[in-house]
Amino acid sequence: MTHRIVILGGGTGGTLTANRLRKVYDRADAEITVVDQDDRHVYQPGLLFVPFGLTHNEDIIRSRSRQLHDGITSRQCPIDHVDLAANEVHLTDTSVLPYDVLVVATGTRLAPEETDGLLEAWNHTAFTFYTPEGAAALEQAITAFDGGRIVINVVDMPIKCPVAPLEFCFMADWHFQERGIRDRVQLTFVTPLDGAFTKPVAAAQLGGMLEEKGVELVTEFNTGEIDTERKVLVSFDGREEPYDLAVVIPVHMGAEYVGRSEGLGDAMDFVPTDRRTLQSKAAPNVFAIGDATDVPTSKAGSVTHFEGEVLVENIEHFLAGEPLVEGYDGHANCFIETGFHKALLIDFNYETEPLPGHFPAKAGLPLLKDSRLNHLGKLMFQWFYWHALLPGRDIPGIGVTMPTSGKEFSRPA
Amino acid sequence: MATTTVTTPAGATSVELTDDGFFVDPSIWTEEMVPELAAREGIDPVTDGHWQVIRFMRKEYLEKGTGPSVRALGKTSGVNVKELYQLFPKGPAKIAARIAGIPKPKGCV
Ligand SMILES: Cc1cc2nc3c(=O)[nH]c(=O)nc-3n(C[C@H](O)[C@H](O)[C@H](O)COP(=O)(O)OP(=O)(O)OC[C@H]3O[C@@H](n4cnc5c(N)ncnc54)[C@H](O)[C@@H]3O)c2cc1C
């Protein structure tokens, strides 16, 4: 019998899952269909560099369908909803895709409408670099900026790549130094968290780096409103942060169709998912990967890559009627660009927070410390993304589970 | 960890709290404790709006094993985010969780 596997979303997770599945199943054994609403696959880590003119949208966007191996059906149409009881996906053009196994890989959507005033401020006084259009508009605003207060604001957690807003601060510091006007630019990072990052050791390290680079840190600020006329962020408890230019990372939610699919998502349209097997809690034949899930680790491409290996193994187990493996440990691995051709690397999982040391073992890249080698690692990641990660190849030496041999566990925080 | 005594009309109960003020054992919580727990967070009197949120948090915790985030609370509790901050100015999810006797809502990564 031919298994019908439908994958919703052709971004990082959907693409690598489809390509990995195509390798393990012959065409006679599985029909694999990927649905996405457009044909623009964005290398999202590149968006950080667009506002500073260090890369351009045309260099980080490729055709989605061309990233899929032969023998995978690609459908370009928005998803309307999933009918879990009937095992069917309904597309907005009214076509219906029946499935034996469904993979939800539709990532997150930005929800600026959740913050009063943000839509009015968008691309006038407040910008984001989380979309290609936003990043391009922000590049113009930064180029034109010749002094004043820039506020970088995370409205709420979770967000994709929670280190990206910090990287933006570091990059902005570097950019304005290069232009010789750093003394006229005030940089302020405004976060709902109680520190620079979610995990204590890394939060202390990154907080120290903000201070070194002269970036002011405002914590526990829950943005309720953006007043574009007065140019202030107003928190729900009435505090105000004035700005000349606001860089805002809006609320993230799951895809809208998840909310229209009875029983599939939670209040924020994320899909409740088993954190170790990646099977959804909605139905046994529904799995989820990447930013679309509610698993408690970072929403990052590296996470999606590590999840992919476990996900495909579990789809095979499921279709063979075998028990699933609890194979995913929450492993995340992120390069943090710090400007001046340097970067820092963090590596962690559900149990272990980012620690100093070396990755993947003692002779490897320095962890939680900036270095030129890590910057090269960050640049190389783009090549890996298109040529190893999306095609579904394993990256030599970097496995699903977090390596422990190079980490300094005993070091006091 | 700290131990505190909560007095209700039914008598005094000794309650263990985490360092950041959340119940270690949610099962010893009773609705009668709410006025005193709320007063300690600066909330007095406890209005219908407070009760709606506290009962909702408790129900969510019992069903799902964790309290909701502020934004999820705003979408599902019938009280919007703005009103939640008016009811619990120091942080709705955290303060309501303390008063509802449930663990700290799971942090985001
Ligand atoms: C600025 C920025 C910097 C980042 N930097 C890094 C980094 O340095 N390292 C790292 O590891 N990660 C980084 N990330 C995060 C990384 O890009 C994401 O975590 C990753 O792409 C998630 O993959 P995904 O498959 O879950 O979602 P996506 O790749 O976003 O794919 C979701 C897909 O679903 C489609 N879709 C959604 N709704 C519908 C619908 N209704 N109908 C049809 N299709 C739909 C979308 O079109 C999209 O193609 C960064 C992200 C950003 C924004």
Image (cartoon, rainbow, N blue to C red):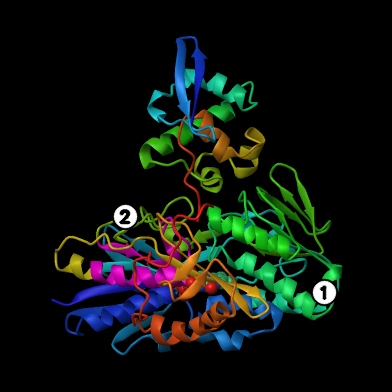
Q: Quadrant of residue A23?
A: bottom left
A178 and B9: which is toward the camera = A178
Amino acid carrying mark 1 in the image: Phe
Disc number at residue A145?
A: 1
**Percent of width and height locating residue A326:** 26, 59
Is residue B53 visible in the rendered image? The answer is no
Q: Which residue is mark 2?
A: A282
**Disc 2, ligand 1: is the CB inside 8 Å?**
no
Amino acid carrying mark 2 in the image: Ala
The residue positioned 64% from the left and 77% from the top of the image is A133
When the figure is inspected, residue B23 is found, relative to residue A41, above or below; the finding is: above
**Percent of width and height locating residue A309:** 31, 72
The residues colored magenta run A285-314
SS under mark 1: loop
Q: Chain of mark 2?
A: A
**Percent of width and height locating residue A280:** 32, 58
Q: Chain of mark 1?
A: A
Instruction: Report if residue A31 lies within the magenta region.
Output: no
Q: Residues within 10 Å of mark 2 (few under 14, many from 20)?
A: some
Q: How many marks?
A: 2
Mark 2 touches mark 1? (CB < 8 Å)? no
